[in-house]
Image: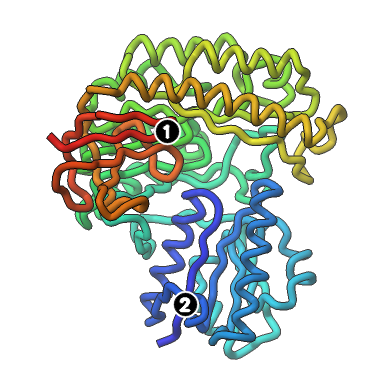
């Protein structure tokens, strides 16, 4: 058997692509190994979203190339968004890479490796901008067996001024509800209790099917309803719900369906109307506030996660302070923050009034310091309360603790619940009383 080692960088959507490559290779008798020095083939699935992720991806390539000297490595494969975005440049500049596989060709990796054994002169494979998986697509879940990501679409129809995703992955391509629910059922049959729905924009789901294929029922609402009623999943967590299309009907569905977690992941990016307009976002401050108020009113126990960009071209001190005031007033449970990255090919890269890196960093630190205070206050509010916790296993901090997550904690992006008393195994759903709170994590015991 050939041995292969995987490195998957970037977002969960990229991880699902890695899981497809993993399954297709295993079906061809490749053995996956944990240590890169044991691998004859190493696949680095890269991210090309912002400058930091590009540098991380390139460093991983350079690090893995060293195993041609000190390991068994025969083929180094570079896949993913960075490869797709800079295909011509990278093929010229990275001679240490044997194969460049784009985001529309990764599903054919076993054949590509086989062909390369015959003709080593062909190094690049870029058929199309993206590959839309189906329920029949082989996939090996790399997450703990009780949870899995479920990708419902590819590409994006929005043209945000700062974002390179449409250039890399193309326009929106949605899977049908039937295909998505079929995969969800397969995941649940394999032991998955928590399904995490991912896409570039959940609330745009099905637009292409409705407009181009005359399938009027392929909507976010119908997808949520079908997943809730047919998948069998105990928890369904939905990421990337942009507020411009989060309807009253959808919010009501979250309230009514117990397995639709009241966890709203809404990337807002900013709140100043001038900055939002330059970003080519679809909503203004008042409309965003209306959506937040609606969620809070209908579901007082709901949590909201959001992301902001600081240092966008032309962001004045006044605009930044408006963002701080908005965050302080709304007290979001979870906030992520990015410093604006000038990405070539995007509209914002040509804007005047680019912000100095030192100012971006200062604003980032100020916003996250404010959110740390808000988060600590919110964490204090959990003391003495009891929550259902999905156990992820023994804690990475100590073998004496278990760790898990409540409905308001998404994997790898939010905090954890550490369990210091009681017995459970990975994948169990247990009731935990919270006895300690920290900036982002909680501690409690099973009752």
Residue at x 30% of width, y 33% of height = 407
From this view, report whether residue 126 is shown above or below residue 401: below
From this view, report whether residue 308 is shown above or below residue 107: above
Q: Image quarter for residue 261?
A: top left
**Camera-nearest residue between 223 and 215:** 223
Q: Is residue 183 visible?
A: no
Q: Residue furthest right?
A: 352
Give the total of numbered labels: 2
Viewer-nearest of discs 2 and 1: 1
Name the image quarter holding the C terminus: top left
Q: Is disc 2 in contact with disc 1, using a CB cutoff of under 8 Å?
A: no
* Mark positioned earlier in the residue sequence (2 or 1): 2
The x and y percentages for residue 348 are: 77, 34
Mark 2 residue element = strand
Is residue 174 rendered to the left or right of residue 116? left
Residue at x 67% of width, y 72% of height = 124
**Camera-nearest residue between 219 and 67:** 67
Residue at x 35% of width, y 31% of height = 408
Pointer 1 local density, CA inside 10 Å: few below 14, some 14–19, many at least 20: some
Checking the image for residue 4, the label placed there is: 2
The x and y percentages for residue 102 are: 61, 63
Which residue is disc 1 drawn over? 440
The x and y percentages for residue 444 are: 24, 34
Residue at x 84% of width, y 36% of height = 350
Mark 1 residue element = loop
The x and y percentages for residue 132 are: 48, 54
**Camera-nearest residue between 29 and 247:** 29
Q: Is residue 234 visible?
A: yes
From this view, report whether residue 103 is shown above or below residue 160: below
Label 2 to label 1, Cα distance in Å? 36 Å
Name the image quarter holding the N terminus: bottom left
Checking the image for residue 287, the label placed there is: none
């Amino acid at each position: 058997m050939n041995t292969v080692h995987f490195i998957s960088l970037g977002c969960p959507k990229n991880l699902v692509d890695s899981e497809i490559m993993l399954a297709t290779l295993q079906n061809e008798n490749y053995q996956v190994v944990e240590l890169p020095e044991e691998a004859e083939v190493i696949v680095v699935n890269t991210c090309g979203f912002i400058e930091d992720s590009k540098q991380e991806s390139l460093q991983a390539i350079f690090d893995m190339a060293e195993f041609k000297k000190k390991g068994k490595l025969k083929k180094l494969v570079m896949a993913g968004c960075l490869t797709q975005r800079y295909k011509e440049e990278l093929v010229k500049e990275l001679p240490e890479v044997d194969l460049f596989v784009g985001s529309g060709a990764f599903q054919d990796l076993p054949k590509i490796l086989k062909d390369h054994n015959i003709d080593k002169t062909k190094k690049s494979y870029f058929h199309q901008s993206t590959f839309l998986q189906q329920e029949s697509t082989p996939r090996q879940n790399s997450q703990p067996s009780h949870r899995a990501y479920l990708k419902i679409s590819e590409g994006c129809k929005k043209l945000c001024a700062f974002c390179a995703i449409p250039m890399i992955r193309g326009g929106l391509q949605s899977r049908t509800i039937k295909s998505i629910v079929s995969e969800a059922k397969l995941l649940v049959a394999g032991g998955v209790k928590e399904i995490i729905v991912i896409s570039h924009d959940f609330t745009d789901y099905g637009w292409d099917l409705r407009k181009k294929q005359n399938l009027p029922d392929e909507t976010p609402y119908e997808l949520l309803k079908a997943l809730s009623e047919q998948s069998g999943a105990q928890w369904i967590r939905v990421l990337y719900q942009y507020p411009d299309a989060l309807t009253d009907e959808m919010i009501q569905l979250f309230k009514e369906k117990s397995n639709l977690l009241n966890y709203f992941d809404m990337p807002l990016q900013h709140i100043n109307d001038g900055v939002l307009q330059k970003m080519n976002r679809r909503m203004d401050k008042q409309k965003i506030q209306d959506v937040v108020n609606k969620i809070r009113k209908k579901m007082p126990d709901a949590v909201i996660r959001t992301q902001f960009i600081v240092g966008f071209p032309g962001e004045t001190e006044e605009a930044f302070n408006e963002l701080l005031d908005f965050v302080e007033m709304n007290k979001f449970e979870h906030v992520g923050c990015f410093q604006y990255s000038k990405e070539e090919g995007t509209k914002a890269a040509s804007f005047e009034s680019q912000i100095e890196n030192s100012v971006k960093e200062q604003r980032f630190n100020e916003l996250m310091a404010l959110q740390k205070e808000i988060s600590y206050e919110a964490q204090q509010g959990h003391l003495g309360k009891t929550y259902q916790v999905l156990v992820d296993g023994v804690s990475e901090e100590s073998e004496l603790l278990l760790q898990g997550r409540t409905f308001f904690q998404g994997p790898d992006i939010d905090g954890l619940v550490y369990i210091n008393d009681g017995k459970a195994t990975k994948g169990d759903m247990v009731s935990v009383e919270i006895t300690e709170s920290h900036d982002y994590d909680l501690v409690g015991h099973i009752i």
